[in-house]
Image (spheres, helix red, strand yellow):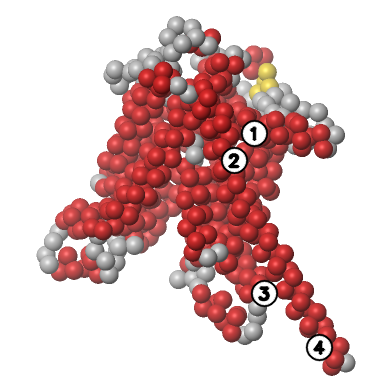
Amino acid sequence: MFCWVMIVVIVPFLIMAGLIWKSSFLLKDHTLGEMIFTSQWKPMSGKFGFLPFILSSLWVTLVALIIAGPICLFSSIHLTQYANRFVLKVMHPIIDILAGIPSVIYGVWGIIVIVPFVSEKIAPAFGIQTSGYTIFSGAIVLAVMIIPFILNILLDIFNSIPIELTEASLSLGAGKWYTIKHVLLRKAFPGIISAMGLGLSRAFGETIAVLMVVGNVSIIPHGIFQPGYPLPALIANNYGEMLSIPEYDSALMFSALLLLVIVLVFNLGSRLMIMRYEKRFR
Amino acid sequence: MKRDSGNKRKFKKTRLKYEEYLFRGIMFLSSCLIAFVLGLILFSILVKGLPALSFEMITQTPKGGFYFGKEGGILNAIIGSLYLALGSTFLAFIIGLPIALYMNTWLFHKEKTVHGLRFILDLLWGIPSIVYGAFGFTLMIFFGIKASLLAGIIIIALLILPIMIRAIDEGLRTVPLGLQEASYSLGSTKSEVAFKVLMKQCMPCIVTAVLLSFGRAIGDAAAVLFTTGFTDNIPTSLSQPTATLPLAIFFQLSSPIPEVKERAYAAAVVLTVIILIISVLARVFTSRFNKHSIKF
């Protein structure tokens, strides 16, 4: 059993090492800064600028978080503070099923519902003509995908706040809403931030659903109604050509490494914050 | 002066009251929105997919010209997905259950080690599946293995392992300490406590963990894209490439031919139904197995 535990501990380092080893081939000819901050993507002539992909990823994830964050926060306060048992009984399976739906299904749903909706209703409202395959559509689909994830963490966080705090506040004559606003939200603040961070890192690595609706054009996006080309989509779309050119292969592995590092940093920060937060109530 | 401050307080109170009404409204609406979105997803998938779904679709493998809208079905993808999910869940279970038990019996008093392990598992859970896929692909090239069912099973098992362990571990943590102490005082060894007491007590949560990982395994597309390949045949051995449902949906949807696109919607219905069955099963099993555990 000890050996198995060791396997689990080693796996992340192994992945890291493998990806670094693979992408080191590209790092021989190009500097790190050159690859991250240039926007020329021409693998055939040896130009690998990751800026459009990184920016697309950031746009999609941030917009998704802006949509999903408030909804999750409000809903989690509703479910933990106001909802009766019947509502909870209905909402728990709903959240579970939403969390269990595979990302391909979200992608199909995005193509059926969100893409036409964006191209026919939302974009014309801003006076823009698009095909609907835009960063905004990707962000909506992504937002729906991370809602159950963030919501579950937020529910845990609000439930872990000791009831005595609320009781003390109520006994001093504060109203329910006043208590929520000034006691609960203040106590839960670090937890809320880290839940958002975890949601962000989950959204960052999401591949298939985003790939299906985001358009996949490698330009630097200037608005949410333009197509984008996030990092995971880049890897998934080009894996077939990986074997043909060693530099290309190495470039894709580098983007996987980039993805891994960004996700791990977000995850590490948020988890450490949650751990410190939980310690305070023990 | 006095009256003024009293008025102010009153004003503040009524303002708070209306603020509360407003925000209660918003909160209620956001909960409704979440429920509505799930309804919308299921509804739109069913409306689009059910007309295209036929008995032939789920009982036949693709015939010649399938990808141009001719006859055939997606049986290869359904069976392939089930093989893949069963295999990887089994593998992850064999590795995961002992680790979870180990963490809660042998490592019980080494709190720092356990905390560290949980932390690493949570981090592993956060790694995107496409990174697993890319890593698996690198390994496969390194060892010279071709895309196959076995490679897919191993990569997916790695992917769902953290979920499996953490889900079982969360259940084991809720077992009261008294139960362990009672069995130790009766002279049982640590493995007896682990496999006979803790495991039995946590049966519902183990079943839920397995079903959860199964659902994750059957729905994952990004890791499988690199490692299992795609074929029209049902695999007969572990070394053959395999079609999977998510990839079948993905490939067929990117086709320009309307008949093929409709099949993608039908395949999406099949996958959704499998996921819904799993989540219903998880609920049923949880309540049924709960009867056999000791209550306090």
Q: Which mark is residue A113?
A: 1
Q: Residue at x 67, y 26 (%)?
A: A215
Q: Which residue is mark 2?
A: B40
Residue A220 percent across, percent down from the top left = 74, 30
Q: Which residue is mark 3?
A: A178
Q: Residue at x 70, y 67 (%)?
A: B21
Q: Nearer the viewer, residue B33 or A235?
A: B33
Q: From the image, state whether disc 1 or disc 4 is nearer to you.
A: 1
What amino acid is labelled 4 in the image? Gly
Task: Give neighbour class at mark 3: few <14, some 14-19, many 20+ (Cα, 10 Å).
Answer: some
Same chain letter for marks 1 and 4: no
Which quadrant of the figure contains the C terminus of chain B? bottom left
Give the alpha-carbon distance from disc 1 to disc 4, as whole Å: 54 Å
Q: Earlier in the sequence, mark 2 or mark 4?
A: 4
A201 lies above or below A23:
below
Q: Nearer the viewer, residue A44 or B187?
A: B187
Dots 1, 4 in contact, CB < 8 A: no
Residue A104 percent across, percent down from the top left = 53, 31
What amino acid is labelled 2 in the image? Leu
Q: Which residue is mark 4?
A: B6
